[in-house]
Amino acid sequence: MAIFLNEEATFKRVESDCIFCKIIQGKIPSFKVYEDDKTLAFLDIGPVNKGHALVIPKEHYELYMDVPENLLLVWMASVRKVAKAVMKATNSDGLNISLSMGKAAGQTVNHAHFHVIPRFEGDGFRHWPQGKYGEGEALRYVDKIKADLE
Ligand code: AMP
Ligand code: ZN
């Protein structure tokens, strides 16, 4: 059975407790840097470096995995647009574009978001430590991951 939604409702996947949904709705303030009908970008309130921005879909999805592919494409295009502007505006040497998925990965706001972080030589922001695979282990991971591709 088809469910017909009005124009506004198709846009309203909103979570009442979500701080980013409140930003989208204008219920709490933010420093917006980019907006289109499906995505929004604003400054992170606790920047790694100044100009650090967050880019989000306007519909509420907790995890990156939850976001439908057509929206994902639009979202990634916004990330690229914002990334180019952040890099130019801050005159940064590089950028990190990152996303944390799930609490164990450090996601603290349950509305999927990409971080766009301007990076400068010697800014002290550190990457993760690197481990090592044991004998034959990398291939076992390859096989397992390939088997789970959809
Ligand atoms: P994550 O830890 O990856 O979930 O990132 C959440 C980010 O949201 C953090 O870097 C926070 O500084 C940022 N943040 C939380 N509340 C706000 C807000 N009201 N406005 C802008 N950024 C926020
Ligand atoms: Zn939300």
Image: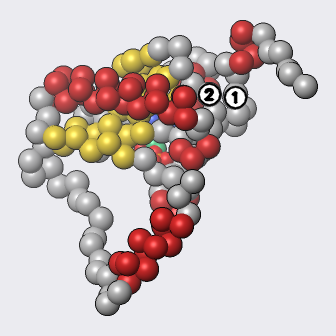
Q: Residue 14: which numbered mark, if any?
A: 1
Residue 131: x, y in percent?
Answer: 30, 77
- Which residue was labeled with disc 2? 59
Q: Position of residue 81 (x, y in %)?
A: 31, 23
Quarter assignment of residue 95: top left
In the rendered structure, the answer to whether residue 47 lies left or right of residue 30 reads left
Q: Amino acid at mark 2?
A: Glu
Asked if residue 73 can be seen in this view, the reply is yes
Q: Secondary structure at mark 1?
A: loop
Quadrant position of the C terminus in the picture: bottom right
Query: Residue 61, how many percent across, how many down?
Result: 62, 38
Can residue 49 be seen in this snapshot? Answer: no
Residue 114's place in the image compared with 134, above or below, is: above
Q: Residue at x 46, y 51 (%)?
A: 100
Mark with earlier residue (1, 2): 1
Q: How many marks?
A: 2
Viewer-closest of 22 and 9: 9
Of 1 and 54, nearer the camera is: 1
Q: Position of residue 70 (x, y in %)?
A: 54, 29
